[in-house]
Amino acid sequence: MSEQSKATAGKASITVRCPTCSKPVTWSEASQFRPFCSERCRLIDLGEWANEEKAIPGAPLPDAVNPDADKEDDNW
Ligand SMILES: [Zn+2]
């Protein structure tokens, strides 16, 4: 399993790009949020993912706000 095996001139450190902000992230134990550069970027990515989950079409939205009552108020 060596998806990022770019040996850089003798250095054993691998750098990946943060999926959120494209910042270079050193793939090491120090980067605990890898492949993200920070916890913030990780949360942003998770948030986007969660939003997409929420935006699944077909889910019934409980926004039935009795249009009749609204209409009457408008016509007045
Ligand atoms: Zn980032």
Image (tube, rainbow, N blue to C red):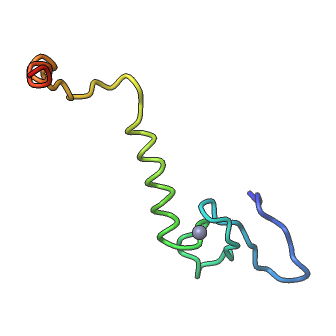
Q: Residue furthest front?
A: 76
Q: Give above or below for 29 relative to 60.
A: below
The image quadrant that residue 57 belongs to is top left
The image quadrant that residue 24 belongs to is bottom right
Q: On the rendered image, what quadrant is the N terminus found in? A: bottom right
Q: Quadrant of ligand 1?
A: bottom right
Q: Is residue 3 left or right of residue 72?
A: right
Q: In this view, does 41 lie to the left or right of 26?
A: left
Q: How many marks?
A: 0
**What is the x, y in percent for residue 32?**
53, 75
**What is the x, y in percent for residue 63?**
21, 29
Q: Give above or below for 35 relative to 59.
A: below
In the image, 18 versus 11, the foreground residue is 18
Residue drawn at the location 8% of the way across and 22% of the way down: 76
Q: Which residue lies furthest to the right in this view?
A: 9
In the image, 16 versus 7, the foreground residue is 16
Residue drawn at the location 81% of the way across and 65% of the way down: 5
Residue drawn at the location 28% of the way across and 24% of the way down: 60
The image quadrant that residue 53 belongs to is top left
**What is the x, y in percent for residue 19?**
63, 59
In the image, 65 versus 55, the foreground residue is 65
In the image, 8 versus 61, the foreground residue is 61
Q: In this view, does 4 lie to the left or right of 48?
A: right
Residue drawn at the location 48% of the way across and 71% of the way down: 39
